Amino acid sequence: MAAPEGIAGVFDRAADTYDDVGVPWFRPIAAGLVEELAVQPGERVLDVGCGRGALLAPLAGAAGPTGRVLGVDLAPRMVSRTAEDFRDVPQVEVRVADAAAPGLPLSSFDVVGSSLVLFFLPDPAAAVRSWADLLVAGGRMGVTTFGPQDERWRKVDAVFTPYLPPEMLDARTSGSRGPFASDEGVERLLREGGLVEVRTAHRVVEAVFRDAEHLVAFSWSHGQRAMWEAVPVHEHPALRQQLLELAGGFGDESGRFSFTQHVRHTLGHRAPEGS
């Protein structure tokens, strides 16, 4: 089972390798969200669940030196590493806060963005409502979640399934049903959170692996680490070998292979005052 500190502990333990094992993943996903949010110079922007800054960096570039970009994350080591990365970017601040309820002043941001975070939260609808309250009238929100998954990736995930506790098999968060299973489900979360003119934009990203060993390293470096930590340690070698044999069948002569992932960016804005 995962350690008692929960998902924050998982990401703290992943912080040193998070988004840093040579797989293009979080950055291209975040780039699509920033494009859809159309952040302007001088805007005040919040990145909820900022991780190692995949979304934070392009947001800071878009807001420019006259803007203000705040990144919050629940994992202290993740925040420490990311704050160090942005120490020379004066418009960026990174602090520890709970994504579910950041505890920030109401109506204090022009833009709120959150990439690949919402499905980790115990009450996504409540989180969206709390984020919407942080927007000024007319302010914009965008959240990124996963669409259809590469069948080979599902086979990799299935190797872990016998070990996972019920909360990790929750169909609501896994996307097999519930709000994260469709565009309409995520759009409903935003509309019920008080946003208007909600829409979804789609992208397809590609995760490229040198070989099966590279996939295993990647699986330890992000949220899938929680799956590893649900497996008894003495069973890790056998499970690792199972993954290597499975992924070994995906590669070309050099061992290289890639997985595709459909990504949805769901966006809306807070209604202007008096509307």
Image (tube, helix red, strand yellow):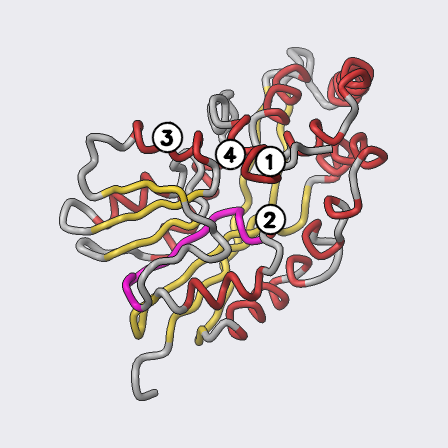
Kindly report the distance in space between the C-alpha atoms of the residues bearing marks 3 and 2. 21 Å
Residue 129 locus on image (x, y percent): 48, 68
| Type of amino acid under label 3 | Ser
Kindly report the distance in space between the C-alpha atoms of the residues bearing marks 1 and 3. 18 Å
Q: Which mark is residue 134?
A: none
Which residue is the site of mark 4? 25
- Total numbered labels placed on residues in the image: 4
Which residue is the site of mark 3? 80
Quadrant for residue 57, please give it: top left
Badge 2: residue crowd in 10 Å (few <14, some 14–19, many ≥20):
some
Which residue is the site of mark 2? 120
Asked if labels 1 and 4 touch by Cβ distance under 8 angstroms, the answer is no
Which comes before the other along the chain, label 4 or label 1? 4
Asked if labels 2 and 1 touch by Cβ distance under 8 angstroms, the answer is yes
- Residue 37 in the image: above or below residue 136: above
Which residue is the site of mark 1? 223
Direction left: furthest residue: 66
Depth check: give the residue in front, 232 or 27: 232
Which comes before the other along the chain, label 3 or label 4? 4
Depth check: give the residue in front, 33 or 54: 54
Question: Which is more foreground, mark 1 or mark 3?
Answer: 3
Which comes before the other along the chain, label 4 or label 2? 4
| Type of amino acid under label 1 | Gly
Which comes before the other along the chain, label 1 or label 2? 2
Depth check: give the residue in front, 116 or 248: 116
Question: Which is more foreground, mark 3 or mark 2?
Answer: 3
The structure residue drawn at horizontal position 60% and vertical position 48%, both measured from the top left corner, is 120
Kindly report the distance in space between the C-alpha atoms of the residues bearing marks 4 and 1. 13 Å
